[in-house]
Image (cartoon, rainbow, N blue to C red):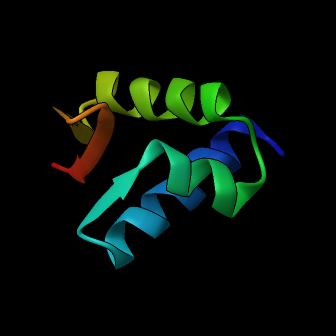
Amino acid sequence: MELHNLKNKILDLAKKDTVITTAEVSNKFKISWNTAEKYLLELTLDNRFKRIKKEGANLWLLK
């Protein structure tokens, strides 16, 4: 799956759900947890997401 395409799909998923987790992204797109985390962090650096660490899980919110 192409990086740009996956980032757009993650953004679409976040528009449907208020909060998403790394595990949800990993399961939805059949990628490893680490890969999902990497893409979410890249989107955060692009100022598209805000990360909240909560009880051992990363929660991601659209900005």
Image position of 4 with respect to 42: above or below: below
Image position of 59 with respect to 38: above or below: below
In the image shown, does 62 or 56 lie closer to the viewer? 56
Q: Position of residue 10 (x, y in %)?
A: 52, 55
Q: Residue at x 84, y 45 (%)?
A: 1
Quadrant in which residue 28 is drawn:
bottom right
In the image shown, does 57 or 52 lie closer to the viewer? 57
Image position of 55 with respect to 29: above or below: above
Instruction: Give the mark count.
Output: 0
45 sits left or right of 42 in the view? left
23 sits left or right of 51 in the view? right
Residue pushed farthest bottom? 16
Residue pushed farthest right? 1
Q: Residue at x 21, y 36 (%)?
A: 55
6 sits left or right of 21 in the view? right
Q: Residue at x 67, y 57 (%)?
A: 27
Quadrant in which residue 20 is drawn:
bottom left
Q: Residue at x 52, y 57 (%)?
A: 24
Q: Position of residue 34 (x, y in %)?
A: 62, 25
In the image shown, does 23 or 13 lie closer to the viewer? 23
Q: Position of residue 29 (x, y in %)?
A: 71, 57
Quadrant in which residue 14 is drawn:
bottom left
